Amino acid sequence: MDRNLALEFVRVTEAAALGSAKWMGLGNEKAADQAAVDYMRRAFSAISFEGTVVIGEGERDEAPMLYIGEKIGKGGGPKLDIAIDPLEGTTLTAQGRANAISVVAAAPSGHFLNAPDTYMKKIAVGPNAVGAIDINASVKDNIKSVAKKLGRDIEEITVVILDRERHAGIINEVREAGARICLIQDGDVAAAVATAFPSDSGIEMLIGIGGAPEGVLAAAALKCLGGDMQGQLKPRNEEEVQRAHKMGIKNMDKIFTINELAKGDDIMFAATGVTNGSFLKGVRLTAEGAITHSIVMRSKTGTIRYIEAHHKFSRKPVY
């Protein structure tokens, strides 16, 4: 993949973040999400590539744009599979809470798991704890293993978990093990990425059940960062099971490794902060426009770039 495309895709996440940030704290989740989708779709149309959305806003009958299978880009470039979340954290944005981001991941055709819109059990760690996790092991055993790999006491390990009723058992197990907990309202892609920056985020592990599409995006990011992740689909009903079968996943008990969620060494990941978070600053409005803070990574080189962009709307309006 042409490395220059990585910077083009940062412009895509910047556009989506700028669009949705106008709705921060206004309590309108739909408007914030729609703005992110609209701005991202227009930004994609300016890039010379042939893209296919494999993780998107839903199936064609559920989403008017950026749906699974949609062709994007203006053509004339490489053929790529695209995984997107124009606004991870619609509720976070609407309520003005932390850790809302706009996300794009790209890879050659067939390198991302075609994950259905269902739940996924996940466990993720940063690069210093690779090989220490086992999704089939108990929460306590995983925490002990990660602590040992990191050379830390269990009491120094912080586990990030979505604050959901379904996680009551996991929360109790973490507390019984003696580790610390960071509960989040939404945004487990950002939370998974945060495990790769423990000195900044204070987070060493992610455990719990969240969206399967977000699991693929998290795997793409951690692949670029050298981290580790495992996932297992947890469909809620027979309709979701059939959706998974339609996408080629026959075994609902299968444990997906990070290399099955995001294959190969030619993956690109870009994200822009919408609201302030654990590893990205949110959009800051200025008299002339806005300032955005983004990250772009490539698995091939392991290079991580942070980009602070100062946008002057009088010279270059947002899409």
Image (spheres, rainbow, N blue to C red):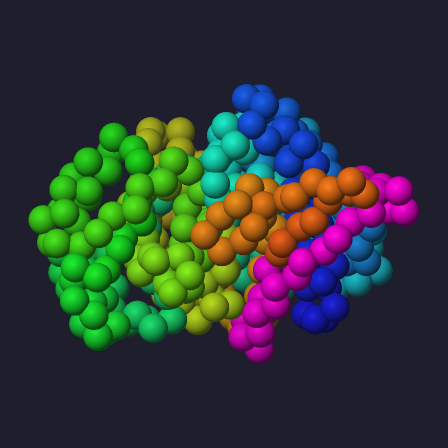
Task: Kindly identify the residue that appears in the image at 50 percent across and 60 percent down.
Answer: 221
Residue 255 in view (yes/no)? no
Residue 73 as seen in the image, left or right of residue 166: right
Q: Residue at x 35, y 44 (%)?
A: 120
Residue 293 visible somewhere in the drawing? yes
- The quarter of the picture where residue 102 lies is top right
Q: Position of residue 70 (x, y in %)?
A: 68, 42
Residue farthest bottom in this picture: 301
Quadrant hosting residue 149: bottom left
Q: Residue at the location (61% across, 64% down)?
A: 306
Q: Residue furthest left?
A: 176
> Magenta segment range?
295-319
**Quick check: 40 above or below 226?**
above
Q: Percent position (x, y) of residue 53?
A: 63, 47
Q: Is residue 264 above or below residue 184?
A: below
Taking the spot 31% from the left edge, 36% from the top edge, the residue there is 163
Q: Position of residue 123 (x, y in %)?
A: 31, 55
Q: Nearer the viewer, residue 246 or 167?
A: 167
On the picture, is 225 further left or further right than 4? Answer: left
112 is within the stretch colored magenta: no
**Dividing the image into 4 quarters, which one contains the C terminus?**
top right
